Amino acid sequence: MPNTSVLFKLTNILTVCISVYFLSACSVEDPYETGPSEEQKKEADERESANKQFIPYELEIKNNSGAPLANITVKVADQVYQSDPNGVIALNTFTLGNYPIEIEHPDYYFTSLTLNISSNKSSEVIELTPKLNNEVNVIFAGDTMFGRRFMDPSITTMGNSVPNLPDAMINQTNAATASIEITKAVAPLFIHSDFASVNLESPVLNQPISVHPTKEFSFFSLPETLEGLTSIGVDYVALGNNHVYDYQLTGLTDTIKFVEEAGLLHSGAGLNAASAYTPIYKNVKGTTLGLVSATSIRGGDHEITYIADDTKGGAADLSDSNNLKAAINASVANSDFTVVQLHGGDEYSYAQTDYIDNRFAFISKLDEKPDLMVAHHPHVAQGFAVYNGVPTLLGLGNFVFDQNRLETVLGLAVEVRVDKTQVPKVTSARAYPIYIDEYKPRLISGDLSNHLIKRVAEFSSNVTVIPKQGYAEIIFNEQLEASNKQQHSIELPAGEHIIDLRDLAPSQSFLTEIESNKEVKQVTFGRDILAFGDFEDWDNDITQFELNHWDHSDEDVQPCLTGAYKGNQGLCLSRDQYDNLSLRVPFKQTVRAFPLTPADDVSQVFHEHTLFGYAKGINAGKLELDLSILTSEDSLVFSEQRLSIFEAGDYAWQPFNLNFELPSDDNLLGPEKLPPRGMRFAFIHSPPQSGNAELQLDDIALISWQDQVQLNNRTWQTTQLHGKTFLRVSTDKAVRLNLTFSQF
């Protein structure tokens, strides 16, 4: 086996097979079945032990000044505890896994977290924020709907009929109960807010008869599904979006009717422009909120547009500066706190477009400017900013949505604390990462939470984003520097090396300084765009050790505690010599290339990639990778190849990397002339020559190579929190790198 440094060197030679074919994921067993291997027995014993063994864990309850808080009642799963005089709670009855935490106290804001109990950590500090006089907390979540694939997994758009499949997540008989079940995992966070808002990106109706005749994607939600929102305490829905007119005037009329019957406030759409722009007001504990909503997606390429005018219904038009200004002026004059929600931008982009940026600037420069701006539409969380003194949520991503695209499954719910007597009126904010697990929103913690927080922080400006346990503190108008430092010194021989920064510092840390003792040829930052290659379970539902996004339907592929390179679990692939087909383990979704962000043209992407990870073999068969390069849409194939990773045999944990590059954008497929943007891959484990084989995989990453690092006087520095977790170093001579990581 290759003699490989765990962090930096890979001497394995990668080969590409000329003749490539894809084998079935299911094995065909010989009659001479050997039974469970020693490794499988060991895993069974380990899992049984994990289900029984309690892991001692301490919670330290403190205020935001760091002082311990006694007599605080804390609910962990279904068990209730109280902190001792030192603010400590000893947990002695929990096994390995994730558990929801709720802390409710009259003097402090409600806290909802996900606790990850593992053998790698023995305590957690939880900070409570005191409630202040005059303060109200308002929570905003993103794109929301209960139609389409919720009702029929096979469809991409809806028409003039109501799907009613008995085994669908939502049908006509279970719409209310199913929608309540869909949102219940995030209910505590919303119920305990003073006011809650979502972008309702769907008409609401029960008799679809007027679907838009030329729109590519249309959908609706049944009226009963609004209980999925009202049951968790949602008060308001923004209707100023590009889907509110999917069923034209009849659908819009029904939507307004059913939304109001459900007790939900709304703005942003109406039967004419005047009603669409009209703000809605709500007194919340003595603070009057004013809410304006509008969309920049007008539908101008259709005969029937999506926006309202003097004689036609639809959404408020974000591009109509005069009407928008008048609506904001009215809201400011009649409320204590005005929120403008903007719907627009490029879908699946990680930063706002120039147009939306200009709209933010226009609104924030008005004489009567709002107190907060909130954006949605791209289905991807985009970060935070301050425009001319106005705090801005740049993009919330999805909340309840049925998209299968990998980049859309992580969104944000942002809690904003408001004091109408202060300047600025936004006193603080918390951003909670939302993971959409099979269309259902979940709170998350740990590495997955930090993955999203660091990425949105990277594309934020004029703010400080501080990662916490399952959320981030957002400080507007102030840029603080992380003060906790950790250093690593690395010796590299001449050549090209990949440094896995995840192995050097915890996930809430980020690289802030590189120092080299000699000149190096090139240093490039890489970003993991896979996010789900650690095989861990980070969400707050009741199912422990679940593994999403990987096809492990074959009984010989299992998430395993014994096969973890790091964390709680890895992925184990078992074979024996009587299995006459190779075992195939696909990643279920297409991974799309990361766009050049920000850029004038969102269609530009980074082309260089590396599939990176760690493997361990116990009499393992040959390990290979099937890799396909596709179009982003329609899955048209540019190339298919099989890459060799490790030959059969025994080896300790070894890193591997497979380098590849997307074809030039001159290569186009299909009638729409689509460029290469998608990547699909599967691991292949061949049968061993004899006996039982065990292959273990962990910490898989698909690296998008992005920014070249400029070393000035052999040094690079930043204070900006970012989500880049790999370095590629090319050097003609042996060098020593001193890496500094920072943490708030």
Image: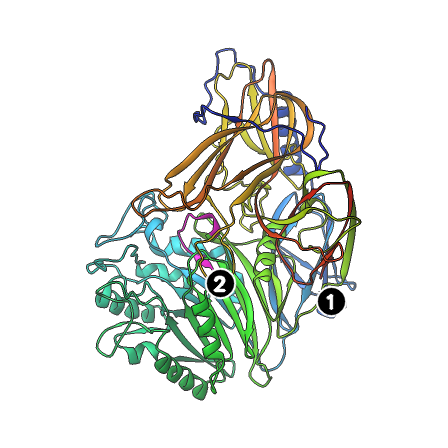
Q: Is mark 1 on a helix, strand or loop?
A: loop
Image position of 300 (left or right of 661): left
Q: Identify which residue, 554 or 324, lies in the foreground.
A: 324
Q: Which colour scheme is used?
A: rainbow
400 drawn magenta: yes
Quarter of the N terminus within the rendering:
top right
Q: Name the residue under label 2.
A: 396
Label 1: few (<14), some (14–19) or many (≥20) C-alpha neighbours in 10 Å = some
Residue 367 appears in the figure = yes
Mark 2: amino acid: Leu
**Residue at the far left in the pictured view:** 209
Label 2: few (<14), some (14–19) or many (≥20) C-alpha neighbours in 10 Å = many
Residue 628: x %, y % from top left = 45, 35
Q: In this picture, is 364 found above or below 124?
A: below
Q: Residue 154 carries which label?
A: none
Q: Mark 1 points at which residue?
A: 69
Quarter of the C terminus within the rendering:
bottom right
61 drawn magenta: no
Mark 1: amino acid: Leu
Magenta residues, as a range?
A: 395-407
